[in-house]
Image: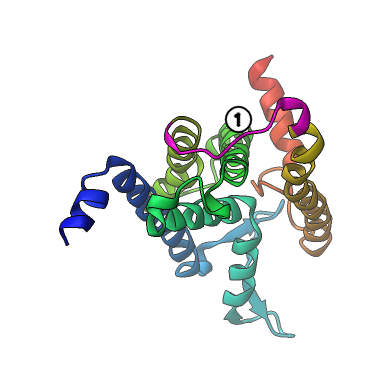
Amino acid sequence: MEKFIKYYCRDWRFLFKLAVVILALFGLLTEYLENVLHLDRIVIVDSDGQRNYLWAVYDQSGKITHLNYAGYTMSWISFFTTQTNVLVFGWFLIAVIRHRQEGIIKPLRSYFSLSVAVYITVTCLIYNILLLLTALSNKNLVWTGCHWSAQLILHTFVPILTVIYVVVFAKHSTLVTTKLFYRQKLGWYLIYPFVYGIYGIVKGIYVRRRVPIMDENNVMAYEDFNENLKFLEKIMA
Protein backbone atom coordinates (compact mmCIF):
# COMPACT_ATOMS: atom_id res chain seq x y z
CA MET A 1 0.00 0.00 0.00
CA GLU A 2 2.85 2.37 0.83
CA LYS A 3 4.47 1.68 -2.54
CA PHE A 4 1.17 2.34 -4.32
CA ILE A 5 0.81 5.70 -2.56
CA LYS A 6 4.45 6.57 -3.25
CA TYR A 7 4.58 5.65 -6.93
CA TYR A 8 1.02 6.47 -7.93
CA CYS A 9 -1.06 8.65 -5.62
CA ARG A 10 1.79 11.11 -5.04
CA ASP A 11 2.73 11.22 -8.73
CA TRP A 12 0.87 14.08 -10.42
CA ARG A 13 1.31 12.40 -13.83
CA PHE A 14 -0.70 9.41 -12.64
CA LEU A 15 -3.42 11.64 -11.23
CA PHE A 16 -3.48 13.71 -14.44
CA LYS A 17 -3.94 10.61 -16.60
CA LEU A 18 -6.60 9.24 -14.28
CA ALA A 19 -8.48 12.55 -14.49
CA VAL A 20 -8.46 12.45 -18.31
CA VAL A 21 -9.74 8.85 -18.26
CA ILE A 22 -12.67 9.88 -16.05
CA LEU A 23 -13.35 13.03 -18.09
CA ALA A 24 -13.31 11.24 -21.46
CA LEU A 25 -15.53 8.43 -20.15
CA PHE A 26 -17.97 10.95 -18.69
CA GLY A 27 -18.13 12.86 -21.97
CA LEU A 28 -18.69 9.75 -24.07
CA LEU A 29 -21.37 8.30 -21.80
CA THR A 30 -23.13 11.65 -21.41
CA GLU A 31 -23.31 12.28 -25.16
CA TYR A 32 -24.47 8.76 -25.95
CA LEU A 33 -27.06 8.45 -23.18
CA GLU A 34 -28.38 11.99 -23.68
CA ASN A 35 -29.24 11.09 -27.28
CA VAL A 36 -30.18 7.43 -27.01
CA LEU A 37 -32.64 8.13 -24.19
CA HIS A 38 -34.30 10.87 -26.22
CA LEU A 39 -34.33 9.54 -29.78
CA ASP A 40 -37.92 10.69 -30.08
CA ARG A 41 -36.65 14.28 -29.92
CA ILE A 42 -34.23 13.96 -32.84
CA VAL A 43 -36.21 15.29 -35.78
CA ILE A 44 -35.63 16.77 -39.22
CA VAL A 45 -37.90 19.59 -40.39
CA ASP A 46 -38.49 19.56 -44.15
CA SER A 47 -39.17 22.56 -46.38
CA ASP A 48 -42.91 22.28 -45.67
CA GLY A 49 -42.36 22.50 -41.93
CA GLN A 50 -43.21 18.85 -41.33
CA ARG A 51 -41.35 17.12 -38.50
CA ASN A 52 -39.78 13.77 -39.37
CA TYR A 53 -38.27 11.55 -36.70
CA LEU A 54 -34.79 10.60 -37.84
CA TRP A 55 -34.48 7.37 -35.83
CA ALA A 56 -38.06 6.18 -36.03
CA VAL A 57 -39.12 3.03 -37.88
CA TYR A 58 -42.44 3.38 -39.72
CA ASP A 59 -44.91 0.75 -40.85
CA GLN A 60 -46.68 0.75 -44.23
CA SER A 61 -49.40 3.06 -42.94
CA GLY A 62 -46.84 5.68 -41.90
CA LYS A 63 -47.15 5.09 -38.15
CA ILE A 64 -44.10 4.80 -35.93
CA THR A 65 -43.59 1.22 -34.75
CA HIS A 66 -40.40 1.67 -32.71
CA LEU A 67 -37.18 3.66 -32.41
CA ASN A 68 -34.00 2.36 -34.03
CA TYR A 69 -31.63 2.26 -31.04
CA ALA A 70 -29.21 -0.13 -32.74
CA GLY A 71 -29.03 2.10 -35.80
CA TYR A 72 -28.29 5.17 -33.70
CA THR A 73 -25.62 3.31 -31.73
CA MET A 74 -23.83 2.24 -34.91
CA SER A 75 -24.07 5.79 -36.26
CA TRP A 76 -22.67 7.21 -33.01
CA ILE A 77 -19.75 4.80 -33.05
CA SER A 78 -18.99 5.71 -36.66
CA PHE A 79 -18.32 9.39 -35.92
CA PHE A 80 -14.69 10.54 -35.89
CA THR A 81 -15.31 12.34 -32.58
CA THR A 82 -16.43 9.13 -30.90
CA GLN A 83 -13.60 7.06 -32.33
CA THR A 84 -10.83 9.52 -31.45
CA ASN A 85 -12.14 10.07 -27.94
CA VAL A 86 -12.38 6.30 -27.40
CA LEU A 87 -8.79 6.10 -28.64
CA VAL A 88 -7.73 8.78 -26.15
CA PHE A 89 -9.66 7.04 -23.37
CA GLY A 90 -7.95 3.75 -24.20
CA TRP A 91 -4.49 5.33 -24.36
CA PHE A 92 -4.82 7.06 -21.00
CA LEU A 93 -6.35 3.95 -19.44
CA ILE A 94 -3.33 1.90 -20.51
CA ALA A 95 -1.09 4.72 -19.31
CA VAL A 96 -2.78 4.57 -15.90
CA ILE A 97 -2.62 0.78 -15.61
CA ARG A 98 0.99 0.63 -16.89
CA HIS A 99 2.00 3.93 -15.35
CA ARG A 100 5.63 3.09 -14.72
CA GLN A 101 6.15 1.74 -18.25
CA GLU A 102 5.25 4.92 -20.09
CA GLY A 103 7.46 5.29 -23.16
CA ILE A 104 8.50 1.63 -22.92
CA ILE A 105 5.60 -0.61 -23.96
CA LYS A 106 4.39 -0.24 -27.55
CA PRO A 107 1.04 1.56 -26.99
CA LEU A 108 2.82 4.15 -24.85
CA ARG A 109 5.82 4.75 -27.08
CA SER A 110 6.31 8.13 -28.67
CA TYR A 111 4.99 7.53 -32.18
CA PHE A 112 1.76 5.86 -31.14
CA SER A 113 1.23 8.47 -28.41
CA LEU A 114 1.79 11.31 -30.88
CA SER A 115 -0.61 9.76 -33.38
CA VAL A 116 -3.32 9.76 -30.71
CA ALA A 117 -2.62 13.45 -30.07
CA VAL A 118 -2.76 14.23 -33.80
CA TYR A 119 -6.11 12.50 -34.34
CA ILE A 120 -7.80 14.15 -31.36
CA THR A 121 -6.39 17.52 -32.52
CA VAL A 122 -8.13 17.03 -35.87
CA THR A 123 -11.37 16.44 -33.97
CA CYS A 124 -10.86 19.65 -31.99
CA LEU A 125 -10.00 21.85 -34.98
CA ILE A 126 -12.73 20.61 -37.33
CA TYR A 127 -15.43 20.96 -34.70
CA ASN A 128 -14.44 24.35 -33.28
CA ILE A 129 -13.54 25.99 -36.61
CA LEU A 130 -16.27 24.58 -38.86
CA LEU A 131 -19.04 22.61 -37.20
CA LEU A 132 -19.60 24.68 -34.05
CA LEU A 133 -20.26 27.83 -36.08
CA THR A 134 -23.11 26.27 -38.02
CA ALA A 135 -24.55 24.70 -34.88
CA LEU A 136 -24.66 28.06 -33.11
CA SER A 137 -26.25 29.72 -36.15
CA ASN A 138 -29.06 27.18 -36.42
CA LYS A 139 -32.16 28.45 -34.60
CA ASN A 140 -33.85 25.05 -34.91
CA LEU A 141 -31.09 23.26 -33.00
CA VAL A 142 -31.82 22.97 -29.28
CA TRP A 143 -29.28 21.26 -27.03
CA THR A 144 -29.60 20.59 -23.31
CA GLY A 145 -26.96 21.48 -20.74
CA CYS A 146 -25.78 17.86 -20.69
CA HIS A 147 -25.39 17.84 -24.46
CA TRP A 148 -23.38 21.06 -24.47
CA SER A 149 -21.21 19.75 -21.63
CA ALA A 150 -20.46 16.57 -23.57
CA GLN A 151 -19.64 18.57 -26.70
CA LEU A 152 -17.19 20.79 -24.83
CA ILE A 153 -15.55 17.84 -23.12
CA LEU A 154 -15.12 15.70 -26.23
CA HIS A 155 -14.19 18.48 -28.67
CA THR A 156 -12.23 20.90 -26.49
CA PHE A 157 -11.19 19.79 -23.00
CA VAL A 158 -10.07 16.24 -23.81
CA PRO A 159 -8.11 17.27 -26.94
CA ILE A 160 -6.32 20.12 -25.14
CA LEU A 161 -5.40 17.97 -22.12
CA THR A 162 -4.22 15.15 -24.40
CA VAL A 163 -1.97 17.39 -26.48
CA ILE A 164 -0.52 19.09 -23.40
CA TYR A 165 0.31 15.79 -21.71
CA VAL A 166 1.60 13.87 -24.73
CA VAL A 167 3.71 16.72 -26.13
CA VAL A 168 5.00 18.30 -22.91
CA PHE A 169 4.90 15.81 -20.04
CA ALA A 170 4.83 12.24 -21.38
CA LYS A 171 7.94 10.10 -21.18
CA HIS A 172 9.07 9.47 -24.74
CA SER A 173 11.02 6.69 -26.35
CA THR A 174 13.85 7.36 -28.79
CA LEU A 175 12.80 9.45 -31.78
CA VAL A 176 14.15 9.16 -35.32
CA THR A 177 15.28 12.04 -37.50
CA THR A 178 12.77 14.08 -39.48
CA LYS A 179 13.95 12.48 -42.73
CA LEU A 180 13.43 8.96 -41.39
CA PHE A 181 10.07 9.98 -39.91
CA TYR A 182 8.76 10.99 -43.34
CA ARG A 183 10.06 7.76 -44.81
CA GLN A 184 9.04 5.31 -42.13
CA LYS A 185 6.29 6.79 -39.95
CA LEU A 186 4.25 9.44 -41.77
CA GLY A 187 2.42 6.98 -44.01
CA TRP A 188 1.12 5.07 -40.99
CA TYR A 189 -0.23 8.30 -39.48
CA LEU A 190 -2.23 9.05 -42.63
CA ILE A 191 -3.91 5.67 -43.09
CA TYR A 192 -6.69 6.20 -40.53
CA PRO A 193 -7.66 9.77 -41.61
CA PHE A 194 -7.52 8.76 -45.28
CA VAL A 195 -9.75 5.71 -44.80
CA TYR A 196 -12.15 7.68 -42.62
CA GLY A 197 -12.27 10.50 -45.17
CA ILE A 198 -13.39 8.08 -47.89
CA TYR A 199 -15.92 6.58 -45.50
CA GLY A 200 -17.26 10.06 -44.64
CA ILE A 201 -17.80 10.93 -48.30
CA VAL A 202 -19.58 7.65 -49.01
CA LYS A 203 -21.68 8.05 -45.88
CA GLY A 204 -22.66 11.59 -46.84
CA ILE A 205 -23.78 10.53 -50.31
CA TYR A 206 -25.69 7.56 -48.90
CA VAL A 207 -27.46 9.61 -46.24
CA ARG A 208 -28.40 12.29 -48.76
CA ARG A 209 -30.06 9.67 -50.92
CA ARG A 210 -31.77 7.89 -48.04
CA VAL A 211 -32.94 11.10 -46.32
CA PRO A 212 -34.15 13.36 -49.17
CA ILE A 213 -35.98 15.70 -46.77
CA MET A 214 -32.71 17.21 -45.59
CA ASP A 215 -32.28 20.85 -46.62
CA GLU A 216 -30.14 23.86 -45.77
CA ASN A 217 -32.04 24.47 -42.52
CA ASN A 218 -30.77 21.23 -41.01
CA VAL A 219 -27.32 20.92 -39.50
CA MET A 220 -26.02 17.45 -40.30
CA ALA A 221 -22.34 18.05 -39.71
CA TYR A 222 -20.74 15.41 -41.90
CA GLU A 223 -23.37 15.36 -44.60
CA ASP A 224 -23.68 19.19 -44.92
CA PHE A 225 -19.96 19.94 -44.93
CA ASN A 226 -20.24 22.28 -47.93
CA GLU A 227 -22.77 24.40 -46.06
CA ASN A 228 -20.34 24.64 -43.14
CA LEU A 229 -17.60 25.89 -45.47
CA LYS A 230 -19.94 28.49 -47.01
CA PHE A 231 -20.91 29.74 -43.56
CA LEU A 232 -17.23 30.01 -42.55
CA GLU A 233 -16.47 32.02 -45.69
CA LYS A 234 -19.23 34.51 -44.78
CA ILE A 235 -17.81 34.90 -41.26
CA MET A 236 -14.27 35.49 -42.54
CA ALA A 237 -15.31 37.80 -45.39
Q: Residue at x 60, y 41 (%)?
A: 123
Q: Which x, y percent locates residue 67?
A: 58, 77
Q: Which residue is mark 1?
A: 129
**Towards the viewer: 35 or 152:** 152
Q: Is residue 131 visible?
A: no
Q: Which x, y percent locates residue 232?
A: 67, 26
State the quadrant of the N terminus: bottom left
Q: Amino acid at mark 1?
A: Ile
Say which element carries label 1: helix
Q: Residue at x 61, y 46 (%)?
A: 112
Colour scheme: rainbow
The rendered magenta stretch, by its main secondary structure, is classed as loop
Q: Is residue 10 left or right of residue 230?
A: left
Q: Residue furthest left?
A: 2
Q: Residue at x 45, y 43 (%)?
A: 158
**Towards the viewer: 40 or 157:** 157
State the quadrant of the C terminus: top right
Quarter assignment of residue 82 = bottom right
Q: Which x, y percent locates residue 98?
A: 41, 57
Q: Residue at x 55, y 61 (%)?
A: 42
Q: Which residues are magenta?
A: 169-180
> Quick check: 45 above or below 116?
below
Quarter assignment of residue 138 = top right
Q: Residue furthest top?
A: 237
Q: Which x, y percent locates residue 198?
A: 82, 51
Q: Is residue 139 visible?
A: yes
> Quick check: 58 above or below 208?
below
Quarter assignment of residue 202 = bottom right
